[in-house]
Image: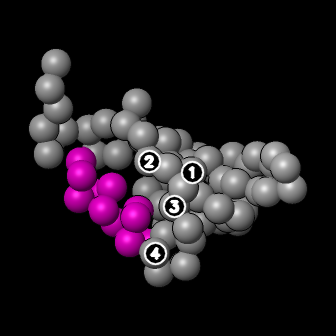
Amino acid sequence: MSSTFYSPSSYEITVEGSLDQSMSNRLAGMSIHYSESDAQTTTLLTGDLLDQAELLGVLNTLFNYRCTVLSLHKI
């Protein structure tokens, strides 16, 4: 099954550091979960996005807040 540019999909985005839970509203309602390993804190964002335009909006918000994106997975 192939996906299209304009179809809803679920994503996992891992960023360096921790984001405040209140950022969820700015990140299209994605869930925010924290993880610590080897003295490094990361934040896992998970959620359903309407299309790749909404994904781009999330990535632009992370860029504007100077977040380092470690990984992005479509699930």
What's the residue type where badge 1 is placed?
Thr
Picture residue at 14% right of the left edge, 26% below the top: 2
Give the spatial CA distance, label 4 vs label 3. 8 Å
What's the residue type where badge 3 is placed?
Val
Give yes or no for contact between labels 3 and 1 (Cβ–Cβ under 8 Å): yes
Residue with the mark numbered 3: 69
Give yes or no for contact between labels 2 and 3 (Cβ–Cβ under 8 Å): yes
What's the residue type where badge 2 is placed?
Leu
Give the spatial CA distance, label 1 vs label 4. 13 Å
Work out which residue is located at the far right of the displayed protein and give it: 39
| Picture quadrant where residue 57 is located | bottom left
The image shows residue 65, relative to residue 50, as above or below, that is below
Give yes or no for contact between labels 2 and 1 (Cβ–Cβ under 8 Å): yes
Give whichever of discs 1 and 4 has the lower sequence position.
Answer: 1
In this rendering, position of residue 48 left or right of residue 31: left
Residue with the mark numbered 1: 14
Give the spatial CA distance, label 2 vs label 1. 7 Å
Picture residue at 74% right of the left edge, 49% below the top: 34
What's the residue type where badge 4 is placed?
Phe
Magenta stretch, residue numbers: 51-61
Which secondary structure lies at badge 3? strand
Residue with the mark numbered 4: 63
Give the spatial CA distance, label 3 vs label 1. 6 Å
